[in-house]
Image (spheres, grey):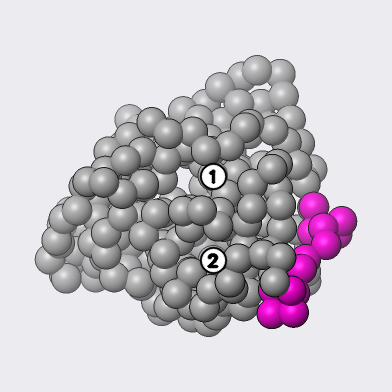
């Protein structure tokens, strides 16, 4: 496992950063195309266009209590994701995300109930965080400039929601210039209020390519609580299209 950053806590740093206009200075690397950079970011987040991932989310409170939740996530294309809940108390539950919406299936009712990606999943994570759809195709990127963060040269991307599959209206992502891996991010509500801070903590080399291994979620009103999402297995796979149909959920 390759750890590309130091663990630390930070909140709302966009108010104090100074972004350089990369088009007007020769002191930084040549500015990349924003869309191309975002597509590189997605390759490091997911690795493949169609993928199956074992995910664990460990939330540690300010007083040291730990809660662990486990999921099996299947993502195909830019707009479809299927999440299977693996904890005994949630067994049989599924989360389905498509471009037109998100649904939660409960085996006791045998019905899929429409929910929102912003609803809390566990700890500091939301339903849309576990669905883990690609950013490209769901957001319009703009390159704001470059910034040195913790001694690391980064590009700063601002993403605006483009499709209904986008969980957050606005994202800001700091991307390492040396290998195009995401380094940290801020997630915003439609009001412009900061909702979450995300640290991309560690990557793992798979088939000669760095793929995300660990990320951490924090929220401003609980600065000492962290939810760590780990991708313990990532495997390219193809899935039947009917698995991602709302009416098929009772048969899974």
Q: Position of residue 47 (x, y in %)?
A: 31, 55
Q: Nearer the viewer, residue 170 or 206?
A: 206
Q: Which of 110 and 64 is in front in this view?
A: 64
Residue 82 appearing in the image: no
Q: Residues within 10 Å of mark 1 (few under 14, many from 20)?
A: many
How far is mark 1 from mark 2, CA to CA?
18 Å
Q: Residue at x 76, y 68 (%)?
A: 20
Q: Is residue 204 above or below residue 43?
A: above
* Prevailing secondary structure of the magenta residues: loop
Q: Residue at x 54, y 44 (%)?
A: 200
Q: In which quarter of the image is the N terminus?
A: top left
Q: Nearer the viewer, residue 17 or 120?
A: 17
**Which disc is residue 200 wearing?**
1
Q: In which quarter of the image is the C terminus?
A: bottom left
* Lower position in the chain sequence, tag 1 or tag 2: 2
* Residue lying farthest to the front in this orientation: 26
Q: Which of 4 and 10 is in front in this view?
A: 4
Residue 135 appearing in the image: yes
The answer to whether 90 appears left or right of 68 in the picture is: left
Name the secondary structure under disc 1: strand
* Residue lying farthest to the top in this orientation: 64
Quadrant location of residue 114? bottom left
The answer to whether 12 appears left or right of 1 in the picture is: right
Q: Where is residue 192 in the image (x, y as percent from the top left)?
A: 78, 69
Residues rendered magenta in the picture: 13-25
Q: Residues within 10 Å of mark 2 (few under 14, many from 20)?
A: many
Q: In this view, does 214 lie above or below 131?
A: above
Name the secondary structure under disc 2: loop
Residue under pointer 2: 167
* Residue lying farthest to the right in this orientation: 16
């Amino acid at each position: 496992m390759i750890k590309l950053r130091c663990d630390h806590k930070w909140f709302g740093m966009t108010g104090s950063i100074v972004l350089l206009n990369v088009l007007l200075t020769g002191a930084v690397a040549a500015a990349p195309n924003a869309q191309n950079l975002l597509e590189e970011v997605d390759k490091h987040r997911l690795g493949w266009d169609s993928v199956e991932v074992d995910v664990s989310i460990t939330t540690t409170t300010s007083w040291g209590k730990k809660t662990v939740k486990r999921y099996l996530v299947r993502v195909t294309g830019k707009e479809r994701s299927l999440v299977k809940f693996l904890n005994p108390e949630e067994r049989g539950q599924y989360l389905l995300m498509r471009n037109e919406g998100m649904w939660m299936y409960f085996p006791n009712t045998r019905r899929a109930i429409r929910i929102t990606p912003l609803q809390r999943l566990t700890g500091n994570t939301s339903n849309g965080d576990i669905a883990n759809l690609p950013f490209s195709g769901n957001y319009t990127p703009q390159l704001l400039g470059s910034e040195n963060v913790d001694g690391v040269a980064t590009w700063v991307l601002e993403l605006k929601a483009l499709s209904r599959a986008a969980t957050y209206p606005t994202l800001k992502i700091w991307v390492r210039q040396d290998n195009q891996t995401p380094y940290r991010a801020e997630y915003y509500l439609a009001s412009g209020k900061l909702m979450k801070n995300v640290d991309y903590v560690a990557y793992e080399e798979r088939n000669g390519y760095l793929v995300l291994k660990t990320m951490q979620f924090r929220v401003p009103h609980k600065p000492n609580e962290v939810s760590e999402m780990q991708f313990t297995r990532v495997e390219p796979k193809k899935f039947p299209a009917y698995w991602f149909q709302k009416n098929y959920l009772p048969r899974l």
